[in-house]
Image (cartoon, grey):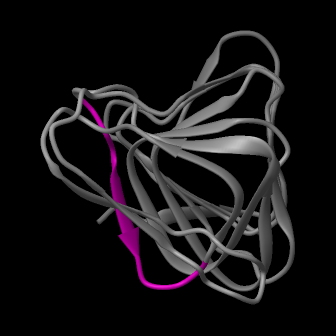
Amino acid sequence: KTAFSSYYNLTCSGSGTKSLTGNVDVNGTLTISSALDASISNYDINLAGNWNNTGTFNERNASVIFDGTSAQSITNTLGETFYDLTVSKSAGTLTLNDNVTVSDTLFMLTGNIDALTDTLKLGTGTLNVGRLSRTSGTIIGNFERWKNAAAGSITFPVGTSVNYCPALVTFTGVTGGT
């Protein structure tokens, strides 16, 4: 496994695309105001602070892990896309200030996701419905999942900040969609 480069706050700005050369651990805020590429090697980003993107993030097949011990947020007025998104928070909530799409896997290890004013979407279409791996935590608010035409059940790990009230929806004879 590639060693981590550690930063307190990390800002990607100026002209041109900045490419990760290894896994990154940011203990403060990550600000993207130019272009950040996770690299063809798909390096991961561990983030203990906020995600602020007014530029471009090329997620490739990388993971972004929110592992802070206090409140964190994701901000991108155009909407943010992550390949794999992991929520591993011992305290505090991850708040979506804008819409967020997880194209492959949403890992919910510990901590809640506040999507009351925006939407968390898992998957990108009926051919890529995304995957959910949940140990703990709740999505508070708007959560959408793609469903293909196959019969089966999917879980919506929703509830409040203190009550986990999952919805298990079973589909038979359906057409794919969200």
Query: Residue at (22%, 27%) from the top-left corner?
Result: 127
Which quadrant of the view contains residue 46? bottom right
Question: Residue 135's x, y, as percent?
Answer: 43, 84
In the image: residue 73, left or right of residue 171: right
- Looking at the image, is 11 positioned above or below residue 93? above
Is 153 placed left or right of 5 in the picture? left
Number of on-image labels: 0
Q: Is residue 9 left or right of residue 135?
A: right
Residue 70 placement (x, y as % from top left): 85, 79
The one nearer the camera, 59 or 115, is 115
- The answer to whether 149 is drawn above or below residue 54 in the figure is below
Q: Is residue 135 magenta?
A: yes
Q: Quadrant of the N terminus?
A: bottom left
Tell me, yes or no, whether the highlighted magenta stretch contains residue 154: no
Look at the picture and state if 46 lies above or below 61.
below
Q: Which of 109/1 is in front?
A: 109
The outermost residue toward the top is 15
Residue 110 locus on image (x, y percent): 58, 83
* Residue name at image x 48 percent, y 36 percent: 38
Q: Main secondary structure of the magenta part?
A: loop
Q: Nearer the viewer, residue 124 or 171?
A: 171
Q: Position of residue 95 (x, y in %)?
A: 81, 58
Q: Residue at x 65, y 74 (%)?
A: 67
* Magenta region: 128-137
As drawn, the residue found furthest toward the front would be: 173
Front-most of residues 4 and 119:
119
- Residue at coordinates 82% horizontally, 55% vertically from top-left? 73
**Which quarter of the rendering shows the C terminus?**
top left
